[in-house]
Amino acid sequence: MDPLLAVIVGIPLAWHLALTAVAYWDAGRVGLEPPKKWAAITFCIPLFGFFIYLFERSELSYEPDDDPYRGNNFNIHPSRADDAPLPSRGDDRLSVDEDDWDETAGEDPPRDRAEQGGDGPRDSR
């Protein structure tokens, strides 16, 4: 067998089998059940399967009390502070009445010069 072929095939195969073994061992240790499922995912989807396992494993250590985005707290740029919030599912804030935030109070702004009532200068070409 050609030594170059053995290196080209052997090293990635060794890494793949090692990642599968690590996923199997670690899944049983941290409580992702069943470990055979995670080994099969890691084995059947080379490299990406191991990342899927790592992302799923990271969800085990999620602490809702430490989540900075838990209470819908986020910064709003001052230029957008007057915008009405959009309602979302499970939104417990008070509903926004359109008259409270709409500065025109029901008046539509004029769309063109005719509605403005002015006959400004006309372009005479």
Image: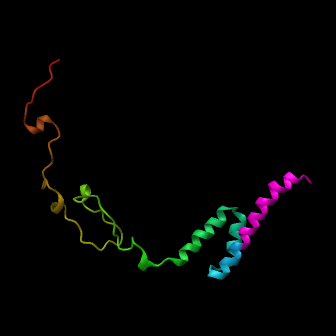
Question: Which residue of the protein is positioned furthest toward the right in this rendering?
Answer: 1
> Residue 21: percent from the left, percent from the top?
73, 72
- Could you tell me how many numbered marks the image carries? 0
> Within the magenta stretch, is there residue 18?
yes
Query: Left or right of 22: which side holds 105?
Result: left
Query: Left or right of 4: which side holds 53?
Result: left
Compared to residue 84, the image places residue 119 above or below, namely above
Query: Left or right of 82: which side holds 30?
Result: right
Which residue occupies 81% across, 56% down?
9
Quadrant housing the C terminus: top left
Quadrant housing the N terminus: bottom right
Compared to residue 118, the image places residue 66 above or below, namely below
Mostly what secondary structure, the magenta segment? helix
| Range shown magenta | 1-21
> Residue 48: percent from the left, percent from the top?
65, 62
Query: Left or right of 44: which side holds 97?
Result: left
> Within the magenta stretch, is there residue 84?
no
> Residue 60: percent from the left, percent from the top?
55, 77
Which residue occupies 67% across, 77% down?
26
Which residue occupies 25% across, 58% down?
78
Which residue occupies 31% across, 65% down?
87
> Residue 28: percent from the left, percent from the top?
67, 81
Question: Which residue of the protein is positioned furthest toward the top in this rendering?
Answer: 125
Query: Which of the 4 image quarters holds residue 74?
Result: bottom left
